[in-house]
Amino acid sequence: MATFLYKLGRLAFRRRHFVALMWVALLTLAGVGAISAPAAGSTSFSIPGTEAQKAFDLLEQRFPGASADGATGRMVFKAPEGEKMTDAANKATVAKTVKELGDGSEVVSVTDPFTTNAVSKDGTVAYLSVKYDAPAVGLKDATRDALETAGDDARATGLTVDVGGDALQAQPDAGGVGEAIGLAIAAVVLVITLGSMIAAGLPLLTAIIGVAIGVSTITALAKALDLGSTTSTLAAMIGLAVGIDYALFIVSRYRAELAEGRDREEAVGRATGTAGSAVVFAGLTVVIALAGLSVVNVPMLTKMGLAAAGTVVIAVLIALTMIPALLGYAGRKVRPAGEKRKKATGTALAKPNLGTRWASFVIRRPVAVLLLGVVGLGAVALPVSQLELGLPDDGSQPTSTTQRRAYDLLSEGFGPGFNGPLMIVVDAKNSDDPKAAATTVTDGIKGLKDVVTVTPATFNKAGDTATITVVPDSKPSSAQTEDLVHTIRDDVATKADADVLVTGTTAMNIDFSQKLSDALIPYLALVVGLAFLLLIVVFRSILVPLKAALGFLLSVLAALGAVVAVFQWGWLGGLLGVEETGPIMSMMPIFMVGVVFGLAMDYEVFLVTRMREAYVHGESPSQAIVTGFKHSARVVVAAAVIMMAVFGGFISSGESMIKMIGFGLAIAVFFDAFVVRMAIVPAVLALLGHRAWWLPKWLDRALPNVDVEGEGLRTQTEKDTDPDEDRELVRV
């Protein structure tokens, strides 16, 4: 591996014009594809194999033309103090609003609250529903504006009017200013780490090019593959972070090789062969973790994972080819490591750096450092025991939004369960008496506790399928409503002469959470298992990969604990812009497991390969730890700060999912880089000593020798690796 990458790096250095033109051409091609591609339109959310999804699919089949995927809007009215919505003047105002909305474009139907019994028992609250023929993200801005402004005249008469429903859903904000601040912080860290603007600019430039290619490709394929805007946001977030880090490691190693006295082409080759090997395997672990999300069998999650994995692959390829090419262009503007200090003192200072001093401290007190790190992360992880999962709805919106106010008004007028009604689908196609079967289901549900309203069964034209709406007494995210869903499925459904399916937002949430829970163990087994085997090959050890996996578990549990504390409990919520607390999104745990595992293995590979390299070259285990920190700690810390800055920039997003992911990944990087990799890892390695690098002889013979530490490069002369240069010397 090291020898191949060594040759690749030197080739890219010599053929820098071709390499640069190749990447510019790919960027142009992807950009043209993105510009000329049709608009993505709506994206579907489905959970194959679940009862809620089967019910939805059955409705699409048995109730054609019902625009099941069309957007819906809900306008809620509340009468002034001392009045009722049934007063003549208020009824006239509502009727005028219904007519105004009905005249709008893309509107399929508008319900009149006084003919559909959509008035609260005390007469103070009423609502109308609007059905559109286009999905939420496909609605025209004019249509969305018309829904928001239709209640202005009603407000002028003294009525309280608020609007909810997915019709107000807009394209999410990906980060904006926060993302730019993150990049600015990354630039400052790069300048400090690499010592010059030119050297710092290379990782930023290549990372931006890689992300631009990845996101443009996603945009070009969005319509064909049904990719949502969140997919490209995630790809940009991860691609930018790893792209900067991978390039940083190669540039940093290049400067170290220059400091050893090697010429620039040789330094590029050796940097690509050694640091580049670490980049390849670090990238592979991230790709495995992201692509492994497909085992969950949730299409949206699969697409997000594969798109982000593709962007990581691009980042790796750019780091291995474009960075060597740009280093060729930069020439002497990228100086050897420590050159300024040598010029200032006139000597090559041997004074230990901060990484060396920290490693020496850990080696002297490994037990204390290990216990402090494990206990600290364990304490942060405690909130995970109170984790509540759910899907976002209008109830999770900030109280300043009209969607949230409409949600609260409906809860006030009709009960908390009104915002999460259950849809019961009765498939009586094989029943002898469909109407009797539907009646049995209706009567059975009416007899259950925690049920407020059960609407009469509504049949399709064929008369073989009916829908029944059930309004629970509890709010959608409550345990009581979840128990009601299970009771209908387990008890009522078994007594009916028909297939009975439960769907709706609450049922979808329950099924989604269960599906993710069922997939977590197989996913962990796949991802951790493959990465464990990969790290055995890299480190030629059993205990080092095992330690890496256990450290990852600490990182991800602590990160999830922090997410619960902030987004569910509200700790530091004001500081981070979290206006409303609530359940954690159902996909968050398994998503964080995938992404954090990949990032955790990044730092493990970057830090420990340098230790392995020193150990292979004859140093003692303790000295190898110090050497690894001497050369890698500064760069790993810089890489972690850059990742945290990039991920942290997305916390400013108005999209709750992006905000939560950005915070979760940023805090996970902090825990993993600064606690696990910089403290727990050296402490464990110090306690293990030579045993850390033990590998059974039979396994050593069976494993391929990938030579990540570059042992093969030590015996390879410039003449052996560059025949073209040798022929040039003969001619001279």
Image (tube, rainbow, N blue to C red):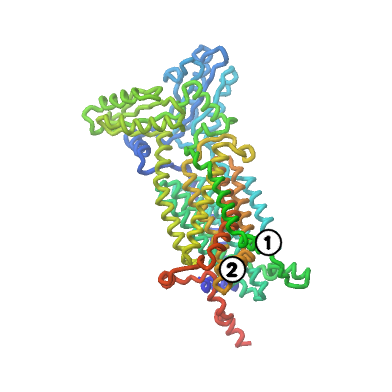
Does 357 appear above or below 578? below
The image position of residue 680, as x and y in percent, is 57, 57
Residue at the extreme left:
432
Q: Does any portion of residue 18 appear in the rendered image?
A: no
Residue labelled with disc 2: 624
Residue type at mark 1 is Leu
Q: Secondary structure at mark 1?
A: helix
Residue at 47% x, 41% y is 586
- 170 vs 502, left or right, is right
Does 89 appear above or below 191? above
- 446 vs 199, left or right, is left
Residue type at mark 2 is Ala
The C terminus: image quadrant: bottom right
The image position of residue 278, as x and y in percent, is 54, 65
Residue at 48% x, 29% y is 73
Residue at 48% x, 62% y is 543
